[in-house]
Image: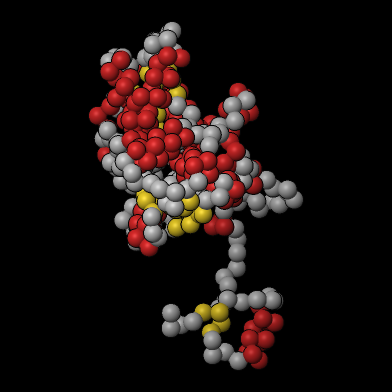
Amino acid sequence: GGSVKDRIAIAMIEDAESRGLLKSTSTIIEPTSGNAGIGLAVACAVKGYKCICVMPDKTSMEKENILTSLGAKVIRTPDTSVDDPDGVFHISRKLAASIPDSIILQQFKNPINPLAHYHITAMEIFDQCDGEIDMIVIGVGSGGTMTGVGRKIKELLPNCTIVGVDPVGSFIAEPPILNETTLKYTEVEGIGHDYYPKTLDKSVVDYWIKVTDKESLHMARKLHREEGILCGSSTGSLMSGALEAARNLKEGQKCVVMFPDGVGNYLTKFVSDYWMESKDFLPRPNIFKHWWWDITVSNLSLARTETISLNMTCGELSSMLYSQGVDVLPCVDQNR
């Protein structure tokens, strides 16, 4: 599937098989921001299980298209809180209750999730760095990567610093004062929540760094442009946090940054200039050189606009339009 979630997908399926929870007619249902769902859908395609992924609306269309091409069914939900009856968790449970032989593998509370990273991902990092790691920077989606990698590395290298990166608009970081913001939404996919996943062991984290969407997306695009690293949006978050955290390192020390996925899932999102402009992460180009383009409405010398009421006759409206020298006037319902 092309992400860090591939390891947990196959591990959770094989664990369910070993416990007799899956059979040939089973349907695997999973609430996901996309990557875990893709990993599960790949495994389901090979093993012959049916797969349903429940994803929030903000998840990219690329992820949905990949899932459907793998034979999975995708159900979208509003971008709501964890307890919302229309959110991914409640909808997943409703589906499981209505579909025979279905199971939710529950990446957000399944202990196999962090165990897969503990036994596999952490050892890959340790071996590839020859056991010399001074800092690891990780984000939190389901919490499995942080918990599994963090626990194993702390056992092997007690002095290694584990840094957690959390988007502004998420509420996972500690102390809680770091999360104080009026924002309740983040455009970055895959990391950040308004709750603590049960698979997250916060004790492995030495400290947290908050990163804004703008910092994250611009960093991801910078990695594309300057390093040729075709990464996803959450990688931008982690790299931004890593550059800040690395200031605490001495010359010659090693910092590992976990890059969760690649660019292919986001071609119509932050990779697109048009999308970045529509979200105000890039300035909109003044193609026609309008003099007023960068002037706020409050600074324009605009004449006061008259309004019309619903009980005005068409004749009265015609006279007012003529006297005002305009083609349209706003209509106001006085009862609202």
| Residue 122 in the figure: left or right of residue 297 | left
Percent of width and height locating residue 252:
43, 7
Depth order, front residue of 71/161 = 71
Specify the farthest residue to the top: 252
- Residue drawn at x 69%, y 76% is 327
Depth order, front residue of 61/246 = 61
Q: Is residue 190 above or below residue 206?
A: below
Percent of width and height locating residue 331:
56, 79
- Residue drawn at x 43%, y 28% is 241
Percent of width and height locating residue 20:
33, 44
Specify the farthest residue to the right: 288
Q: Is residue 210 visible?
A: no
Depth order, front residue of 213/264 = 264
- Residue drawn at x 29%, y 19% is 154
Q: How is the image coloured?
A: secondary structure
| Residue 17 in the figure: left or right of residue 310 | left
Q: Is residue 292 above or below residue 219?
A: below
Residue 164 image-quadrant placement: top left
Depth order, front residue of 291/85 = 85
Residue 119 image-quadrant placement: top left
Residue 263 image-quadrant placement: top right
Percent of width and height locating residue 99:
40, 60
